[in-house]
């Protein structure tokens, strides 16, 4: 069940959180940086295989300066198609306007590998990717004051590695939402058979 952050997978701005730190008494610590960009956005997808949960969750993400629009998200979905190598994908997205624009709906209608489902409005607690972003922002991106977008990309990739090397963590994001993935029953079988 891929999703994105508003991310996500939806795309969301990478707002960096200030974390607590130590400093000499009476001296407020300052983070200094020479950023030449105002904003970075990350699009990501957590993939859960519905018929074979033992395959593990798969994570893909895309980082860029600025914000995502429909064209940028279509580019991300083209990369996702390659990432999932022809597997059928159900993408669960929130209500971000770029996710549901006419151009996006027209593009998706031409894709035989992709089905879009919409999260209820104002329900980030149902999006496992929101927990992914929270994990990254609390650890690798906390107090980050990089001089270049590459610094943010490197820290993000470190966090992605941390999350993907712990096979239980991506599943915990899904479990925390209260959602689960059940393989569909074949149409000729009832549950009581």
Image (tube, rainbow, N blue to C red):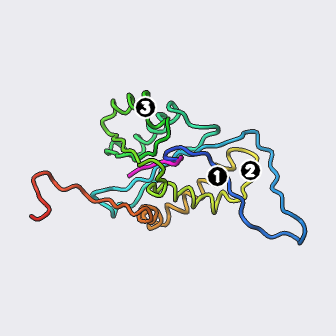
What's the mark number on residue 91?
none
Q: What is the quadrant of the C terminus in the image?
A: bottom left
Instruction: Kindly indicate whether the residue at mark 1 contacts the one at mark 2 (C-beta within 8 angstroms).
Output: yes
Q: Nearer the viewer, mark 2 or mark 1?
A: 2
The image shows residue 128 at horizontal and vertical percentages of: 46, 57
What's the mark number on residue 146?
2
In the image, what residue occupies the spot 49% across and 36% down?
Answer: 97
Disc on the earlier residue, 3 or 1: 3
Residue where numbered disc 3 is placed: 104
In the image, what residue occupies the spot 61% across and 45% down?
Answer: 13
Q: Magenta region: which residues?
A: 1-6
Q: Secondary structure at mark 2?
A: loop
Disc 1 residue crowd, few under 14, some 14–19, many 20+, Cα 10 Å: some
Question: Above or below — where is 96 with respect to 125?
Answer: above
Q: Secondary structure at mark 1?
A: helix
Farthest right residue in view: 26
The image shows residue 14 at horizontal and vertical percentages of: 63, 48
Residue 80 drawn in magenta: no
Disc 3 residue crowd, few under 14, some 14–19, many 20+, Cα 10 Å: some
> What's the CA distance linking mark 3 and mark 1?
30 Å
In the image, what residue occupies the spot 44% across and 56% down?
Answer: 126
The image shows residue 114 at horizontal and vertical percentages of: 34, 40
Residue where numbered disc 1 is placed: 154
Farthest front residue in view: 122
In the image, what residue occupies the spot 49% across and 67% down?
Answer: 166
């Amino acid at each position: 069940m891929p999703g994105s952050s508003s991310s996500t997978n939806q795309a969301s701005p990478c707002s960096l959180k200030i974390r607590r730190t130590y400093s000499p008494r009476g001296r407020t610590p300052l983070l200094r940086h020479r950023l030449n960009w105002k904003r970075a956005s990350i699009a990501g997808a957590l993939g859960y295989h519905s018929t074979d949960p033992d395959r593990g969750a798969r994570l893909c993400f895309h980082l860029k300066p600025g914000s995502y629009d429909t064209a940028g998200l279509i580019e991300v979905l083209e990369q996702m198609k390659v990432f999932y190598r022809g597997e059928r994908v159900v993408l669960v997205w929130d209500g971000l306007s770029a996710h549901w624009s006419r151009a996006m709906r027209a593009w998706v209608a031409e894709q035989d590998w992709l089905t879009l489902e919409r999260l209820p409005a104002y329900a980030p607690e149902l999006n496992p990717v929101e927990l992914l972003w929270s994990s990254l922002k609390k650890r690798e991106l906390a107090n980050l004051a990089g001089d270049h977008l590459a610094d943010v990309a490197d820290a993000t990739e470190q966090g992605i590695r941390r999350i993907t090397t712990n096979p239980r963590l991506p599943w915990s994001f899904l479990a925390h939402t209260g959602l689960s993935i059940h393989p569909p029953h074949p149409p000729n079988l009832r549950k009581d058979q």
